[in-house]
Image (cartoon, coloured by chain):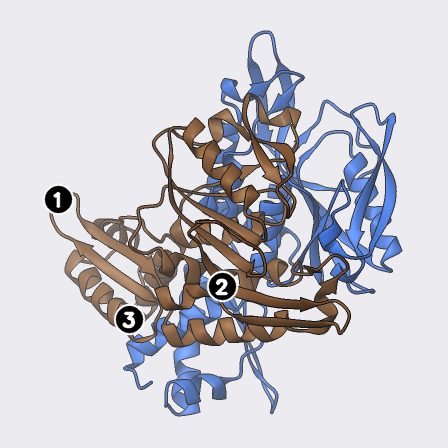
Chain colours: A blue, B brown
Amino acid sequence: MKLRRSERMVVISHYLINHPYQLTSLSYFAERYESAKSSISEDVSIIKKAFEEGGIGHIETVTGASGGVVFTPTISKEEAYDVLEDLRKRLSESDRILPGGYIYLSDLLSTPTILKQVGRIIARSFRHETIDAVMTVATKGVPLANAVADVLNVPFVIVRRDLKITEGSTVSVNYASGSAGDRIEKMFLAKRSLKPGSRVLIVDDFLKGGGTITGMTSLLKEFDSSLAGVAVFAVNTLEEHGDLDYQALLKVSQIDVKTNHVQVEIGNIFDSL
Amino acid sequence: MKLRRSERMVVISHYLINHPYQLTSLSYFAERYESAKSSISEDVSIIKKAFEEGGIGHIETVTGASGGVVFTPTISKEEAYDVLEDLRKRLSESDRILPGGYIYLSDLLSTPTILKQVGRIIARSFRHETIDAVMTVATKGVPLANAVADVLNVPFVIVRRDLKITEGSTVSVNYASGSAGDRIEKMFLAKRSLKPGSRVLIVDDFLKGGGTITGMTSLLKEFDSSLAGVAVFAVNTLEEHGDLDYQALLKVSQIDVKTNHVQVEIGNIFDSL
């Protein structure tokens, strides 16, 4: 396909946006768009500048025979703040309080534009970590894990609370469930879903007691894998989380079922950006 | 932010790619990048041409005071064929056969690059339908629904097989489960998760007996909503599906547990592209 320079830049941008964290050789683009490697190289340096000025991400050039370019998406601190502040306001709406002190999150975690932004924020927060896979527990965490894995371009792994015949062999661990942590339950992960030696980022929608995350951490050991970090959409700071180290987008510091009032603040993830 | 034309085209492309099916006025870009509306208009026509030649999608210009541009992503028939043929080969691998005649799909449905392409194929297949939401059943269908919703820029709705306290009020229906359809189970959907009058696309990972999809269709009626279509990742054509109308990416026509052989073909969705 032969294109004009300006058009070529648009299609190369599109390719890089859809293939983050992946090394692509300049020859690939040169062949695909029937252009000299030197022209492609100039295109990439313009795209690089635009991506940086627009807060879209960074393009790294790897030189040598097996070299090429790698796009790392990001989000500017300003844009991240706007996203978090908007989510904070929406989570503070009084009609989200459910009996039992729970908060309704499903609408936020099923809106693609929100998920994309949240994925970029979490990925930026862990930019100094090597991450091979994103892990979560079914069902609510799945869209969040999907969004983060999307930005990082790594697979995501779904831990289940029940056994499904369509998963093949599984490994299971016990974990303490419920706010009081006094109920012991099982969680399962399909044997072939995680490669040994993986560095794993655990994500979840809502951190209350922390039992689920502790359970997933012990599953990692069974797969000879290690924890790269923990990110949650919202944390309930009214509960104890022991020495669990996590990055939260939002912090729920008060839920009053009687007055229908919920107090939400921007979480500690903002300081890590 | 003041940018050169070539850089401006890159950041406008990025914006449009991330806001599909959404009307954005040219003034928005003109203000954001401190340029004349006429320059933005020229940028957009170059991007439009590049998106079309690259098989990325279409840009429609809406004129008038409340006008602007709308980006509709697509996938070329050639690219769709390559994706489907690659998936067909991977699904044909003998080590995917699980006891009971099930097929292991989780690795494919948890890889972001695959999900993105699958989302584009399903969205293209239903390009003539108005779709307000994508519906699926927990857990396996979630990444697929997420991927399609992402391309269509609409929310997705997760039906559950169990009751969760964090969902608030729910509506439930009975459905026939199992291959023989002789087990009656319940499925639940949170009341506030779907607006009445929605046109809904149902997606699922694997179509066997069809009971789950019939169940979701009856849930739609409870929400005064209607079915825009059904898309599945793979269909087992060894089972009867009555008069269920669906688009499948892949078709499993034979599973031989003894010889560890599975026969997979490209599904009927290809003809709809």
- Badge 3 vs badge 1, beta-carbon distance below 8 Å: no
Task: Mark 3 vs mark 1: tell me if same chain.
Answer: yes
Q: Which amino acid lies under the numbered mark 2 shown in the image of this protein? A: Leu
The residue singled out by tag 3 in the image is B52
The residues bearing labels 2 and 1 have C-alpha atoms spaced at a distance of: 41 Å
* SS of the residue under disc 2: strand
Chain of the residue under the numbered disc 3 shown in the image: B
Q: Quadrant of the N terminus of chain B?
A: bottom left
| Label annotation for residue A224 | none
Q: Position of residue B31 (x, y in %)?
A: 25, 50
> Going by the picture, which residue comes out furthest to the top?
A258
Image-quadrant location for residue B195: top left
Q: Position of residue B112 (x, y in %)?
A: 57, 61
Q: Residue at x 38, y 87 (%)?
A: A39
Q: Earlier in the sequence, mark 3 or mark 1?
A: 3
Q: Position of residue A38 (x, y in %)?
A: 42, 90
Category of crowding for the residue at label 3, using alpha-carbon neighbours closer than 10 angstroms: few (below 14), some (14–19), many (at least 20): some
Q: Quadrant of the C terminus of chain B?
A: bottom left
Task: Mark 2 vs mark 1: tell me if same chain.
Answer: yes
Q: Which amino acid lies under the numbered mark 3 shown in the image of this protein? A: Glu
Q: Indicate whether B227 appears above or below B92.
A: above
The residue singled out by tag 2 in the image is B249
| Label annotation for residue B65 | 1
Q: Residue at x 64, y 62 (%)?
A: A154
Toward the viewer: A5 or A107? A107
Q: Position of residue A57 (x, y in %)?
A: 50, 62
Category of crowding for the residue at label 2, using alpha-carbon neighbours closer than 10 angstroms: few (below 14), some (14–19), many (at least 20): many
Q: Is residue B36 left or right of residue A112?
A: left
Q: Indicate whether A92 appears above or below B62.
A: above
